[in-house]
Image (cartoon, coloured by chain):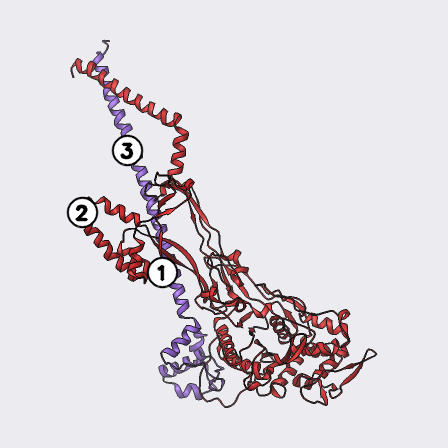
Chain colours: A purple, B red
Amino acid sequence: MKPPPAHAFVNRLIGLTLVLLIFSGSLGLGAVWMRQEISQAANRGRLLEGKMADVERRLDEVNAQVAAAVNPDALLRQNQAMQLGLLSPREIQVVRVGESPELRLAAKRNREVFNVATASISDEANPLAFHVLTTALR
Amino acid sequence: MSKGFATNRLSLLAVGVVMCFMTVAVRLVYLQAVDRDELLRFVDKARRQIVVEHARRGAILDTRGNLLATSRSELAVAVDPWSLVEYLEIEKNPARRAQRAAEERTKHARLAELLGLPVADVEKAFVPAMRAVKPEDDTRDGKVDGRVKDRWVKLCEGVDEPTFDQITALNVRGVTHERIYRRVYPGGGLAAHVIGYLNREGTAVAGAEHKLDLYLKGQDGWIESEKDGARRELAQFRSREVPAQDGDDVVLTIDSVVQQIIENELKNIGATYQPQFATIIASDPMTGAILGMANYPSFDLNAYNKAPLAAQRNFAVTDIIEPGSVFKIVAAGAALNEGVVTPQSTFDCGITTIDYEGRTIKLPKEDEPFGLLSVADIVAHSSNRGAAQLAMRLGDERFYEYARRYGFGETTAFALGGEVRGILEPPAKWDGLTISRMPMGHSVAATPLQVHMAMSAVANGGVLLRPQIIKEIRDNNGAVVRRFGPEKRATVLRPSTAATLAQLLTGVVRVGTAKGFDIPGFEVAGKTGTTQILVDGKYSTTHHVASFVGFFPASRPEIVLSVIVDDAHVPNGGTAYGRVVAAPAFKHIAEQLIQYLDIKPVMPNPGRFLAMQGGAR
């Protein structure tokens, strides 16, 4: 078999070298691109952390303002400034309701819906219909 | 491809490539081996940084979750005048430079407006100046002359975030800032003595801030990374990151509204009687949870540096008083509990002397002449001689033992500390008169909180509880990490005895020393106290401690309330009796608490005419 000419071997070598250069260059560029991406992702993360801290700071600020605004002393001052005349009730003004207000309101509503006002109140012997309708509210 | 290309040019290229690689290799060896240490030091100094991440201090909340103390960021705005100089020097065109300077001056005026400063002050801050430093520290500008450029001229402190946003939007050249966290107290002076405060250095000074600092302060974190030429962090080079752990939130048992009610009453007392000090405590007798604790004088937590030190003391625990007639609950409770008397047992309270353990003892004076009184009458009318005879029935040791059981002579283990033990000497140290004087609250000293907790023991069926001021600790996600429940300290009385004594104490407001201060339907049980103050070793006839300590409703107590006023000045020169100074305040507070806490009456109260539901508890 006839050996290949020297220049063909050299050409192949050049070709391989070029391929190797392209390959290693691609690897290098890929590495640079990856590092760039890592850097950008890290910076985005840092910015987000900064934003979160900023939001938390503002939340604290708002919470402090709300707390100061709803402070009992501030509300009393508002009451005076706005001349609302709001006072806490005195015992003589208070009637405490012993029964469940939900049931009472439900009974009222039932009477209106089913037009059985007289029957449901006056018919004490047969209050079952009322109980069935209101048990879900308990 | 020709042969020449394959030989001459290729060889040239190969040599070139090899030389390039050789150059790189030499340079690498030089960098990695020869200059390695020096370069590493330089990089480390120039790029490496450790950023401390400050933990956010936890909040203090009341029992309903209202903020009592929180942290807010504030900014110190400053100027780097040299930055402006450098910015202007970059522009070589004189006309454009003048235009830039004019633009900046316009911004300075707006900046001054936002900061509330005179424009001249802001302009003055932008004048570049040098400042003196130690020669060994003078390494910044290359010249070692002990002077460096002053790049931090403070303009204003305490700038809030919204204002700073506007300043940032102005884009003023040379403006810089430092963000700091400052403690703010939205309630101002609300519960000032309980909450305490952080001073400007960030040191917790008093109250819950100080005692619970370990929970509140959290733990700072840190980030080890690198920075670029503009000192910005290069996040991709973070090598170690320890996140900050924010402080826990502390929930107190204090109720802001209850606290507000008692503080308002204290303000009224202060305005009317100008006392040395006054204390009001409100608590739940069944748990020992303190719903309100306030003192007069008080101070604004946001302006603590302007408050005198005397106003910063929590008198409820730091000062002692002679409890006076309130102490009669010890003698009456002990005598009933030991079965040596019944409520109907009678004593001659008209006598002036009595034989006791082989000695004739002079009995103390009464405010009004009494004759034969039952135990119920002794309590209701606060007979000094009656109380002395009750104690004598018990004897020195048993009476002392009961006084100890009520918690006198030892701290209440108040969680915020700062309290004193009071004075209760053992019988071995008593003189001949002590057994007749101590039952009326002389020869003994206690803090207002000790007196309050003693009455609380009567209210809750005879159990002495630890006063509870901390409800729970929550982490920054809101999860409860520690909960504080009631803590029993001692059994003072049998439940039946406590109930009997509670009923006897209702006589005080029905027929006794505080007659007229009952609240119909709510069975107020209490005891007045009026103690002469020791002035120069003698009991003064013009200076008194007035007190009313009680609870309601007597048959199912929901609130224990103490009003103690030291050295009140009664208008028209009257004596500062407990019924004059403290009982009206007690009643006024009780009426408001009944509505706010929706305390139900014990018996039907006729005469209501308007349908209205009180605030839900």
Which residue is found at the position 48% from the left and 83% from the top? Answer: A96
- Say which mark, if any, is on residue B228: none
Helix, strand or loop under label 1: loop
Q: Amino acid at mark 2?
A: Pro
Tell me what residue is drawn at x 29 percent, y 37 percent. Answer: A33
Please name whichever residue, B545 or B73, is drawn nearer the observer in this view of the structure. B545
SS category of the residue bearing label 2: helix
Q: Are marks 1 and 2 in contact (CB under 8 Å)?
A: no
Which is more toward the observer, B544 or B166?
Answer: B544
Crowd around label 3: few <14 · some 14–19 · many ≥20 (10 Å): few
Given the image, what chain letter belongs to the residue carrying mark 1?
A: B
Q: Which residue is mark 1?
A: B160
Tag 1: residue type? Asp
Image point (67%, 88%), residue name: B368
3 vs 2, front mark? 2
Q: Position of residue A24 (x, y in %)?
A: 29, 28
Residue B94 — which label?
Answer: 2
For the residue carrying disc 1, how many other residues have a C-alpha within 10 Å: few (<14), some (14-19), or many (20+)? some
Q: Where residue B367 sits in the image (x, y, percent)?
A: 67, 86
In this view, B326 is above or below B161: below
The chain containing the residue under callout 2 comes to: B
Tag in front: 1 or 2: 2
Please state the horizontal and vertical placement of residue B267, each as a whole percent of the image: 49, 77
